[in-house]
Image: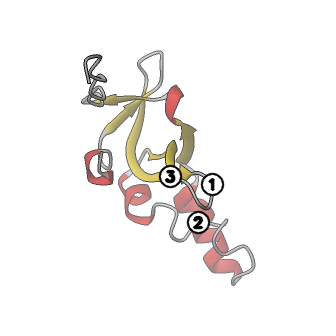
Amino acid sequence: MRAGELLGRTAYDLQGRRLGRVVDLVLRGPADGPLRLTDLVVARHWYGRMSGRLIGPQRHPSGPWAIRALARMLGRRTRQLPLDRVRLDPPLPEPPAADPAG
């Protein structure tokens, strides 16, 4: 699966409430092994989709106060959620089943 297939999709919680749109992906894994998609970053508003996490306070914790304040304001509706707690629309395709004969 490619990142472009996930970015921009509408995300819902498990109860069906709209969370926003997927703006970023979080991948984790060992340094010498494959990466695995673990979390999605979801933004509720259009300006959160523009900034994503690029200017977030976690990226610039010691910058000028005006930049930190702007980053907090823009990123307050942006959340990182575990993949298993999010439902996407349209849904993710099912991975192909392993061929039992092969």
Of the residues tagged 3 and 2, which is closer to the observer?
Answer: 3
Name which quarter of the figure residue 31 lies in: bottom right
Visible in this render: residue 91? yes
- SS of the residue under disc 1: loop
Point out residue 94 in the picture as x, y percentages from the top left corner.
29, 25
Marks 3 and 2 sit apart, C-alpha to C-alpha, by 27 Å
Residue to which mark 3 is pinned: 34
Whether residue 39 appears in this view of the structure is no
- Left or right of 9? Residue 33 is right
Q: How is the image coloured?
A: secondary structure
Give me the C-alpha separation between circle 2 and circle 1: 25 Å
Q: Which is nearer the N-term, disc 3 or disc 2?
A: 3
The one of 31 and 89 positioned closer to us in this rendering = 31
Residue 4: x and y in percent read 27, 53
Neighbour tally class for label 1: few under 14, some 14-19, many 20 plus, Cα within 10 Å = few
Per the image, the residue denoted by label 1 is 30
Residue highlighted by disc 2? 56
Question: Which amino acid type is marked by label 3?
Answer: Pro
Residue 89, label in figure? none
Determine the secondary structure under disc 2.
loop
Point out the tag, 2 or 1, that comes first from the N-terminus. 1
Please provide percent x and percent y for residue 43: 45, 48
- Name the residue furthest bottom: 64
SS for dot 3? loop
Q: Amino acid at mark 1?
A: Pro
Label 3 neighbour load within 10 Å: few <14, some 14-19, many 20+: few
Q: Is residue 50 above or below residue 44?
A: below
